[in-house]
Amino acid sequence: MCAIAGQIFPTGNNAEKYKKIYEEMYLTMTRRGPDQKGAFIEGNAALIHARLSVMDPENGLQPMHLHMGEKHFVLIYNGEIYNTAELKKELSELGHSFETHSDTEVLLHAYAEWGEDCTSRLNGIFAFAVWEKHSGKLFAARDRMGVKPFFYTVRDGSFIFASEIKTLLAHPLVKPEIDSNGLMQIMLLGPGRIPGDGVFKGIKELLPGEQGYFDSNDPGFSKKIYWKAEDREFTDTFEQTVEKVRYLVLDSIERQLASDVPVCTFLSGGLDSSIISSVADRYFTKRGERLKTVSVAYKDNEKYFKATKFQPNSDENFIKIMNDNLNAEHTLVIIDTPELVSALYEAVDARDLPGMADVDSSLLVFCKEIKKIATVALSGECADEIFGGYPWYRDKTIRERDGFPWAQSTAWRAGFFRPEFLEGKDPVKYVDGYYRQTVEESSVLPGTNALETRMKQMMGLNLKWFMQTLLDRKDRMSMYSSLEVRVPFCDHRIAEYLYTVPWEFKDYKGCEKGLLREAMKGFLPDEVLWRKKSPYPKTHNPSYMKAVTEELKKVIADPSSPLLGLVKKDALEELMVSENAVPWYGQLMNTPQTIAYFLQLNYWFEKYKVKLV
């Protein structure tokens, strides 16, 4: 895993004049890539790379060059290719020779051989750029599921790109400005954002499964989608579906355990992380090695935990059951309120935007501790989106209601705006437009019944919106501590297949992710296999609510706080004492997290010197 950045000018410009700018950009990348600095600055092209060594640390240095006759390719790349061995074999048979065992070299040869069609052959998480020195074109691509980021902007005819927004903002042509669209995203959609939009004015992001060329001879960036979830006729029996799901899950996990540096797994005692830990444990044991598992908990959580419909039980007992059934070495990280609150601001630094409040900051603190024992971790994200685990898949009332199911709060959110920001704008229409556009874009075969149609729409909404927010969170919070987190359930083959599987199969035994549970029988103790879904653990300690309330009171007491120029003071005061049951976002962002979101928003305006234009 790494960080990439660069700038391509129209032909005739000299990138070497801007070396100081590229040094400033590089300094923003070192957390993602602390192990090696690399740059290619020549002619009208500048490519910058910061490396986190995972595969073939001795070699695999970037930017990586390949000369084929008169052709000269230069690659910078962030990610992992999990089918490297198969690609390398195929390319070798076509006459390619390799000097390393890094996936970087295989990716470069794959592009040289197949050009833009190489992306359809890759199984992995990636964002990369290849400069064709001979043609004056830059090719850029992002993985199908959107695990790895690729932000870009076009300024003064040049194409500037980076793994993170902060790196773009280090360039003097890119200003920290937001217009009314960015502001509406922050207040009405945040911490989600419009697919392909970077919130800051003029900053875009390649969509998952999108690629494109910037031609310096005729400046302009042309893009196309090379992959999306498509509905297809489904003919497998339930038994065949179970077998295929088991194969895909096992194959994805085992592929993603490959590493030349220490690996561990997240373990919450929930279904998804327990499946990954169990498979990894068997893999390590066969090799005569011992897996490391890591869990997170909060000080005094057992004392204050109260069961709810969405969080029926806490994790501790299930983590113990799993550890008793594994040969793993376990580490428990306990987080207390002060560091959770403090990390709210670091989490903004990591994401470059207000995020999921303590859902972000807890992961950031957790990843700092994980980095002490491993460089690579496997996590259970994306199973809920793909296998139908969330309440909004299964609760008929929520499922059939129009609007993003994780944020049924537009009117309440809009009530925080100072009146001048809503003049001439309709918040409900704004949000509803993006919802309906996504629903209309969902792939559904003609003749599909109403229930199946709705479930495919729900999966499309989750893949394009909610899952992207969680993948942003996972990537930024982990890479902030130079930790690579892999997400085996996010294998595009799993998503591709499950998109076509009928809801009746996914809802086996009337249980969330029932199909996945049936497919993984024998890998988990029954208590864990059939445990009711419980979301990512969060603090229940009342000290957290008290702490964020005190923080917000300080913000409100300071007339110069940028938050007060945007949000009504009385609405914030009411928030701190209200018993509002409407979550801000998802299942986890309730009143304390909403308060924390406003703290992050205020900090973001101050730290990033954000200007409304």
Image (tube, rainbow, N blue to C red):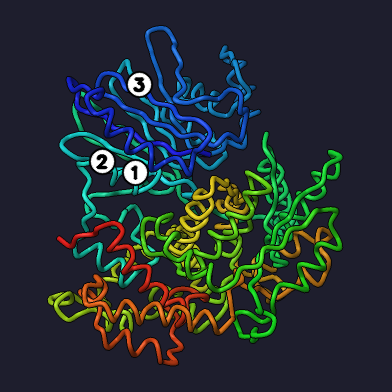
Three-letter residue code for mark 2: His
Which residue appears at 41% of the width and 77% of the height? Answer: 594
Q: Nearest the camera: 314 or 303?
A: 303
Up/down of 186 relative to 143, above or below: below
Asked whether the viewer can see residue 329, the reply is: yes
Which residue appears at 13% of the width and 75% of the height? Answer: 424
Look at mark 1 in the image and give the residue it sits on.
167
Of the numbered discs 3 and 1, the one sitting upstream in the chain is 3
Name the side, left or right, on which 411 lies relative to 276: left
Which residue appears at 26% of the width and 55% of the height? Answer: 200
Three-letter residue code for mark 1: Thr
Look at mark 2 in the image and give the residue it sits on.
171
Of the numbered discs 2 and 3, the one sitting upstream in the chain is 3
Cα distance in 3D space between marks 2 and 1: 7 Å
Look at mark 3 in the image and give the residue it sits on.
132
- Image coordinates of residue 527 in percent, x first then y, are 81, 72
The answer to whether the residue labelled 2 contacts the one labelled 1, judged by CB atoms less than 8 Å apart, is yes
Name the side, left or right, on which 414 lies relative to 517: left
In which quadrant will I find the C terminus?
bottom left
- Image coordinates of residue 43 in percent, x first then y, are 26, 18
Which residue appears at 70% of the width and 67% of the height? Answer: 270
Instruction: Name the residue furthest top.
Output: 69
- Image coordinates of residue 250 in percent, x first then y, are 73, 48
Number of numbered labels in the structure image: 3
Q: In the drawing, what numbered circle is on residue 392?
A: none
Three-letter residue code for mark 3: Glu
| Mark 3, secondary structure of its residue | strand
- Which of the 4 quarters of the picture holds residue 323? bottom right
| Mark 1, secondary structure of its residue | helix
Cα distance in 3D space between marks 3 and 1: 23 Å
Up/down of 286 relative to 403, above or below: above
